[in-house]
Amino acid sequence: MWNFSKNFVYAVVLVNMIIGAVHCSWDPYKVLGLKRGASMSEIRRAYKQSAREWHPDKNRNENAESKFVEVNKAYELLADPEQRKLFDQKGVVDDSLNRNMHNPNNRFGDGASFFSGHGGFRFQFKMSEMTAFHQYKITLRRYENFIFPQSHSQPYLILIYSEWCLMCLHVLPIWQRLVEDLNPIGINLATVHFDQEVELANKLGGRRGELPHVVLVMDCRISHYIEDELSNSKVIEFIRSRFSRNLIAFVNDQNINEFIGGWKDNKVRVLLFGKLELVRLRYLTLAFKYRPHTLFGYAQLNLETTRTIVEKFGIPSKLDSLLLFQEDRDRPAARLSMADLPYSTLKDVIEVNKYLQLPRLSSQKMLDLLCPPESSNVRRRLCAILVTEDREEDEEAREQLRHFTRQFKFSRDRIVFSYLFREKQTEFLRVLLEDGKSPAEATTKLVIVWRQDIQRLSYTWLPQPFVSGADNWNSSVDYLHRTLIKILGSAQPLAHTTLMKELVDEYAQGIFGRITARLVTTVEVLRDHFTRQELLAVGSVIGTVLFIAAVGYVMTYLVRLEEETIRKKDKGLPKTPRPTTTELKLHELRSETYNGMVRLLKPGCRTVVLLLDNESMDVLIPKFHKAVWPYRKNKSLLFGWMNIDRGLPWYSRLLNLALKIVDEDEGTDVSLDSNSVKPKNCVGTVISLNGHRRYFCIYHARHPECVSDSGAKRMQNMARRLTVSNRAMNDTSGAFMGFDTSLEDSENSDIEKGDPLKSQDMEPLITSGLGLHTQQFSADFALDGLSNWLDRLFEGTTQRYYINYWPDFGNF
């Protein structure tokens, strides 16, 4: 809300308005809905709300116009300290107020007028008063295509207005003064008509009823002016606050050498001298505009801390001065001293000297500025590039080339001298080298480049390297001078043409720098959009969270102190050592654990399972536990057991799948009936399951692998091809897989055919007292050979039985 001045009166012409003193029957406080003694901020707030409510554009009530006039009159009276004091003391309104209302020549008539008509009162502005705003009016297209991109180097102050906005007329003189003060120092001003450019006005934060609204567009960021009062000084202070604090460095006798000698960052140094402690706004806008190429410093005159600088460079004590340094720290490239340094003069001096004598091609943007594309062969602009490395040894060659540019003053419109670091611009150099040469071979050599368009360039290498040193300097200079004169005097194209690779930006921000910049921007946006009360509320919440965290930390610290105290007290007491043993768990293989123990095993892992029944459980589990105990620390092994009464269908299916794989080589078809597998013969069997590679190894006391006395080589072959024929189903060697080998089957044999084993000249597979006609199988010695079998298992010498898939665990 803008503060009305004493003499600013709205042009109100009311029919039959009472002339003279108006007694307390008309109360301006009641009109605005206030109590007597209200503060000025409350008056402004109430007026803003009432004016928005009764504005003729928003309220279609027939009394809206007269009510709006009355609201403005009430605010005018209360905004004038003298009129308000008179009304508070005597309850009357000064007669001069009414005379001004009826005077057609008052200054309010310059801004707005009321006239009578058949339809009642009519409210309108004179269009002549809006001309001051209209001449700076911009459109959305101009803003997006010109103003917003250009804000990287030049700030724009934009005011959003409307023709029905009384407050806009009030700020008109202030706006005209801002135009006169800010335009000459590099800050452009523009206006946006709210009714004609609604989209642009909303993008800039303008809202109907809250006009005028002022924003600053700078560096592609929008900053909102949020002060209650609009004045010239406050707006300038607002603009000044938007510039970075380190945009201009403060220079004194201690840091002058560091400031001037820092030109290796590829930037010119500009040192300003002034009598004021505060840096002028024109210097800030100038430093903002040229910040990609220059670094600004400011030294205040008439101070002890800057006396040495002033005496060294002969700076007048009563004038503002500028010194511009390039590579030479003792001799400025340009200097200027005036009572008041104009912005245009400063701009002209810096524009001519904004590059170093020998600038470095540190980015693609720098190449575009120094060597812009030019398709015409006659107007072509050449760029002589010296290839060096980022080391002190090559500084002499660069310095000699600077001396060459000072000695032979070639026009920058024809040729520009520069250099680059080979190790940082490898891709750019690689396309300029011939026959696949290494970029290292181009060190201290000069290449002449002509950019024909954005991507295509023509170039030629000087065959003689630019060698520094007293012995080689004269010949290098003469050869370089002759070559350049020949190239510039000829319209012939250069030797080679290629497609250019873009240069790497050596000063690009890293991820940490980008995050920091984004955080700073976020803080500034929050500062612009949140009031003090809202920030206090957020701060209280954050403070509460921090307080809770601090209390938790203190409590944790106290608990730790108490534990340390108890530990110190118990330090002298003897401690009973606790036995530490590594636990070995045996898991039961059943349907719930089947996937985890078999199917989902990781590569390289195996599960070793013992088959038992209820009767043999107490005998076999301790022996199995003892046998596998040495392998308890192996993370790739899992040990378990399976009740054969529950898992017999799965075990039969597993054997059947193994038999099919074995007999595929012989062309026979063998199938196994689950009734052929007897649970008693399976007790004591140990199987090693490799879930990932789908194979298993099997241990049984009657398995041929367990017999110490090998029964000849054919016994082992028969063990590997155990189920080649159907007769193997009834062979005694099948006992290791659970086949029934009882004497009951002999009753159904054909005695006339004789013993089938002897007819084929073969001995029984199992010997040493474990065969068919010997002692009965016992669980007491079923796992006696398990330890040896486990050793062979991990050596990889046991027989492996492969299957195509793992069968389901359950009843079939």
Image (cartoon, grey):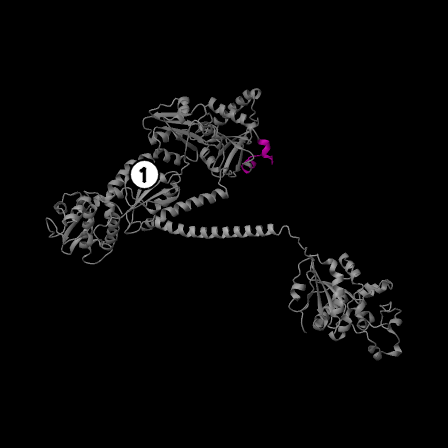
Q: Is residue 428 left or right of residue 274?
A: right
Q: Is residue 433 left or right of residue 749?
A: left
Residue 616, how many percent across, how many down?
Answer: 75, 71
In front of the other: 270 or 81: 81
Q: Is residue 531 visible?
A: no
Q: Is residue 139 left or right of residue 566?
A: left
Query: Does 645 appear in magenta?
Result: no
Question: Going by the picture, which residue comes out furthest to the bottom?
Answer: 747
Residue 264, how many percent across, how many down?
Answer: 49, 31
Q: Is residue 676 left or right of residue 105?
A: right
In front of the other: 393 or 491: 393
Compared with 206, 583 (above or below) is below
Which image quadrant is residue 370 in? top left
Q: Is residue 151 visible?
A: yes
Query: For the residue labelled by badge 1, is the local secondary structure a helix, a strand or a loop?
Result: helix
Which image quadrant is residue 796 in? bottom right
Q: Which residues are magenta?
A: 427-442
Compared with 79, 293 (above or below) is above
In front of the other: 766 or 394: 766
Compared with 137, 497 (above or below) is above
Residue type pointed to by label 1: Ile
Give the residue number, with chain letter if any, for mark 1. 236
Residue 100, how many percent across, how many down?
Answer: 14, 45
In front of the other: 751 or 27: 27
Compared with 259, 703 (above or below) is below
Label 1: few (<14), some (14–19) or many (≥20) C-alpha neighbours in 10 Å: some
Query: Residue at left 62%, top 52%?
Result: 570
Residue 180, how many percent across, how many down?
Answer: 28, 36
